[in-house]
Image (spheres, rainbow, N blue to C red):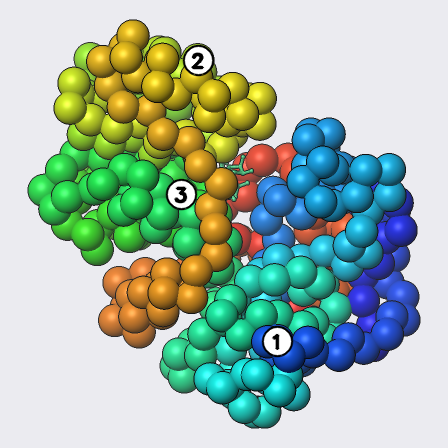
Amino acid sequence: MKAIVRTKYGSPDVLGLSEADKPTPADNQVLVKIQAAAVNPLDWHLLRGEPFLVRLMGFGLLKPKHHILGADMAGRVEAVGRDVTRFKAGDEVFGTGMGGFAEYACVREDNVVLKPAAMTFEQVAAVPIAGVTALQALRDHGHLQSGQQVLINGASGGVGTFAVQIAKALGAHVTGVCSGRNAEMVRSIGADHVIDYTKECFWQNGKEYDLIVDNAAVHSIRRSLRSVKRSGVYVLVGGSASTASILLSLILNPLISRIEGRKLASFIASPKQSDLTFLRELLEAGQIVPVIDRTYPLCETPDAIRYVEEGHTRGKIIINV
Ligand SMILES: NC(=O)c1ccc[n+]([C@@H]2O[C@H](COP(=O)([O-])OP(=O)(O)OC[C@H]3O[C@@H](n4cnc5c(N)ncnc54)[C@H](OP(=O)(O)O)[C@@H]3O)[C@@H](O)[C@H]2O)c1
């Protein structure tokens, strides 16, 4: 099969289109003939092995263990492992795993769900990591309730565009923060109010929110926390200061929360079939519509990753396999 392969850590220049062995599903996996994949910031972190800590998380210390990247994928089941009960050959699915930048990948049965018939493979490939992250940030870590005021920082990116729509579906009043060029798009997906971060700092305008979901943490957490109501929550998802902040805040959360009198949460999203099912229902109901910025052919995956690494994508970047 054709695949975008790398054998060492490095920039997108180490990626090349090559022939690779078609994988064989383990007992609990399905073999998917991939139609579309999506690029996430995770891909360039794993590509570069940066921050170094990712290498300690089982991805290979000096050399990468995974030669094919791509965690979001959508396609047709071609074969199933012997313990798989929920899927059969021919099913159209989307979900998350490893090796999506290829013609075939094996994915655990409990990490995929059936694709809504009315949606394209490109649309559903956009959903898994960004959608699940947004859902877990709002519902599980932010404990969002209907009627609450939520601010989504980085509202125009992959996670942000899902967060705005999911927050609206959960009944919140949503303020999105993005650059002016994306303001209209963020309004069009449901934000009640938009702050252009090139003109106004949300943490300086005196407004307070029940929940802040921060996908673009560039300010100190203490500053952002001051825009959270006393009973509210600040959920750190990521951003340019992200990795060090996430790790530090994971350790210091209880202390910072006590000093500032507001709850601070940070987390690494974990794929769950129940969350993918929840998102599929929102897709089917038209309550979330994936925002797709650009689509690249498989052979141009290195360019797609370069673009995502710049940190200004408008929704999701799709690889058409
Ligand atoms: N914790 C987890 O489990 C988890 C899971 C997924 C992702 N993440 C992390 O979360 C972050 C966001 O991921 P993503 O997939 O949404 O990234 P993305 O698609 O690259 O989106 C980045 C967005 O950030 C916006 N942005 C850049 N600078 C900003 C600023 N100063 N203020 C407000 N917005 C700004 C950009 O908007 P403009 O173009 O308008 O500037 C862009 O739309 C990344 O750091 C990623 O690594 C964490």
Residue type at mark 3 is: Gly
Residue placed under numbered mark 1 in the picture: 29
At horizontal 24% and vertical 19% (from top left) the residue drawn is 262
Q: Write the residue at 59% across / 76% down.
A: 28
> For numbered disc 1, what is the local secondary structure?
strand
First in residue order: circle 1 vs circle 2: 1
- Residue occupying image coordinates x 34% and y 50%: 135
Say which residue label 2 marks. 220
Quadrant in which the C terminus appears: bottom right
Q: Is residue 6 above or below residue 104?
A: above
Kind of residue at disc 1: Gln
Sequence-first disc among 3 and 2: 3
Percent coordinates x, y for residue 116 in the rendering: 39, 79
Residue 180 position, x and y percent, is 40, 32
Q: Quadrant of residue 275?
A: bottom left
Under tag 2, what secondary structure?
A: loop
Q: Amino acid at mark 2?
A: Ser
Which numbered mark, 1 or 3, is in the foreground of this view?
Answer: 1
Secondary structure of residue under mark 3: helix
Specify whether tag 3 is near ligand 1 (CB below 8 Å): yes
* Left or right of 213 on screen, residue 2: right
Residue ID for mark 3 = 160
In the picture, the disc for residue 79 is: none
Crowding near pointer 1: few (<14 within 10 Å), some, many (20+)? many
